[in-house]
Image (cartoon, rainbow, N blue to C red):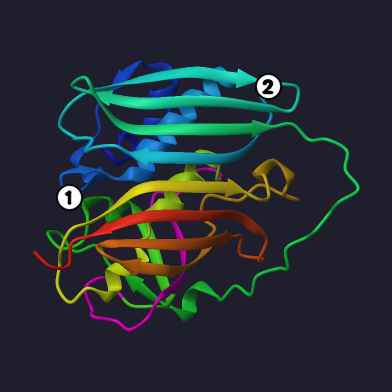
Amino acid sequence: MSEALNNLDHYLQQAADETSMQLDPSWGQGRTTFGGLSAALILKKIRQQSGEAGLLRSLNIAFCGPLFTDQPFEFATREVRSGKSISHWQGEIQQADNVATLVNACFGRQRDSDIQVDHPTLAVPQPDDGKQLPYIQGLTPEFVQHIDFIYHQGQFPFTNSKENRIHGMMRFSDHPQQILEEHLVALIDAWPPTVLQKMKAPGPCASVTWSLEFVTPLSQLSQPIAGDEYLYYEAEIRQAHDGYAHTEARIATQDGTLLALSRQLITIYDKR
């Protein structure tokens, strides 16, 4: 498959036009599809139908089961409820009569308010100051070949690291024209789970649930984010025990503007 027919924008267009589709194995993550891609596709489908629901405020994603790249899948979306300010939508990907990914999206219209608390600008390093995570066939997930990762703090997966944090930069290798919400969703989920660096050897690790809050809507930025710009990502393990880890992350533009907050529940299989 040509690169032009295998990038995220190609699949987003398919999601907008089709009720069913199939993904190339290069977007795989073990035996399933890269979760950020499936969430981005559902968001695209919801966006297509939600119309003037308002700005995207939050997403809650449940990875209910594997989404295989060698099989077709279908979308299902519905409006849960809409009020004057807030609208709730739900979307899912179904494969072989099973729900693989479930997304709840909350949209909110702007309202007048005297309360304003601004987040301080984040100190964002330069991309050239870090080390790049390479795509290594058979070792890294297949989808890593589509994304540029630069580490500024933390270690690569399976290095028995003592670190509880990862700070770094990210962008798509095949640059879109500009970063939309769907691109942002996929990039945020692309990073190896923060806890993976603490494992001594390769082993399974998977996101179970994922919550995203969009602090600064992209439409409110002074200018669009170009597709070749890096975004900043910093994540920390809040707690890990009994085979589960709880992580939090902040995502910002290169000038330090906070874009999103992310929380994940992750399963870890370091002892088998």
Query: How would you classify the magenta stretch by its main secondary structure?
Result: loop
Q: Is residue 192 visible?
A: no
Quarter of the image where the C terminus is located = bottom left
Residue furthest to the right in view is 114
Numbered mark located on residue 30 in the image: 1
Graded by Cα atoms within 10 Å as few (under 14), some (14 to 19) or many (20 or more), the crowding at tag 2 reads: few
Q: Tag 2's secondary structure? A: loop
On screen, residue 104 versus residue 118, left or right, reads left
- Quarter of the image with the N terminus in it: top left
Q: In this view, does 173 lie to the left or right of 59?
A: left
Name the residue type under label 2: Glu
Q: Which of the 4 image quarters holds residue 86?
A: top right
Residue at the image point whose x is 35% and y is 36% from the top: 38
- Seen from the viewer's position, the closer of residues 43 and 247 is 247
Confirm whether the magenta stretch covers residue 176: yes
Q: Name the residue that disc number 2 marks.
A: 52
Q: Give the range drawn in magenta.
A: 156-178
Q: In which quarter of the image is residue 149?
A: bottom left
Which percent across, then down, holds residue 197? 29, 73
Q: Residues within 10 Å of mark 1 (few under 14, many from 20)?
A: some
Asked which secondary structure carries label 1, the reply is: loop
Where is residue 63 shown, x and y percent of the image?
A: 32, 40
